[in-house]
Amino acid sequence: MHSEYVRFVRKAVFTSVGHQFQRIISQKKDSLSRDKTVKTFVRLNARKIIAAATIGGSTLAVLINLYINFTQYDIISPDKFIPLTINKITPVNHNTSIFRLKYPKPLKENLPITSCFHIKDDSIQIVREYTPISPTDEKNYIEFLIKRYNDGYLSRYIHSLKEGNIVEVRGPILTFPYTPNMKAYIGMICGGTGITPMYQLINHILCNPDDKTKLYMIYANVTKQDILLLRELDQLSQEHPDRLKIFYTLDQPPNDELWTQGVGYVSHNAIKNFIPGPQEDVLILVCGPEGMIRYVSGDKARDLSQGPVGGVLKNLGYKQHQVFKF
């Protein structure tokens, strides 16, 4: 059913049109209703979709196919919250832990790359979005790297839970429709817990022998202790020195050791000197605190679509189809 639309809708990203599609189709509970809804939605929105910002070979068919595949999961769902048990909690540093949630039975399908989940506190209906860091082909559990913020109610709630407690999750929800070799070079600029979608994608790319994409990442934090997944990232860069290069920058570098990488925020010069330039075979991904995203790439639009490219990336000559903001 989906292939008939590929002829006239060649490229699309998960923009406001995609969000609208997800809201509409999630209301349809049976496959016949979904199929009719997909046909109607594509027909009515073809002009918007064709005019949407594009990234490489991503298509509306990918979006539709992934979403409808999500509805086939018998354990998790993008439409409703499902209770999962906290199987293991692993502290990472003073304010961040990895929470492993166990599925009641193994998944039949791999999770899509890149996708996120909604987690909520059922008592007051607060919902936040988290990207899993476990492998997408892991069928028995899912892991989230969650930082505790003093002013973040949900993060404080999750950190108050113990092994054996229940967490309600909804997903997977597609955030960026990646396809292997869609670009020759991917630059990643992230800060703090913005590492999670990058880590998910890095693992996915490097584990695929057919994906030849080269990765360059700038990762900003306050102190060295705040660098999440440092050991895992260093191991990946050592195992794939020609395909993954990482530049760390710290607001407060350590005083008791020689620090040879960046100092301060993600600067214009750091991006210019380390991240691949604005050629057509380059894609830049940005994820992190709002202030960092605003400075590096410009904010998203109010409707959560990508919005125009701004900030440092605009000044360096990157175009809208070369930048994606998580």
Image: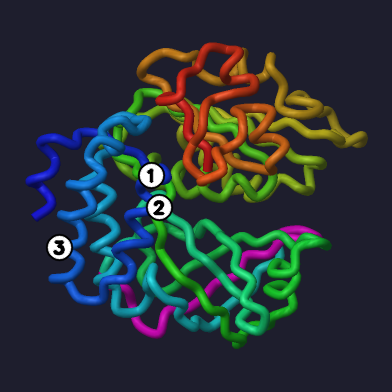
Q: Is residue 161 visible?
A: yes
Give the quarter of the image for residue 155.
bottom right
Give, as a single range, the part of the protein colored magenta: 92-108
Which amino acid is tagged 1? Answer: Phe
Mark 1 crowdedness (10 Å alpha carbons): few <14, some 14-19, many ≥20:
many
Residue drawn at 71 percent across, 27 percent down: 266
Colour scheme:
rainbow
Residue drawn at 66 percent across, 68 percent down: 90
Q: Secondary structure at mark 2?
A: helix
Judge left or right: residue 260 versus residue 107. Answer: right
Residue drawn at 41 percent across, 49 percent down: 114
Q: Secondary structure at mark 1?
A: loop
Which amino acid is tagged 3? Answer: Lys
Q: Is residue 113 magenta?
A: no
Q: Which mark is residue 19?
A: 2
Q: Secondary structure at mark 3?
A: helix
Nearest to viewer (mark 3 / mark 1): 3
Query: Label 1: which residue?
Result: 14
CB atoms of marks 1 and 2 within 8 Å: yes
Query: Label 3: which residue?
Result: 36
Nearest to viewer (mark 1 / mark 2): 2
First reached walking from the N terminus: tag 1 or tag 2: 1
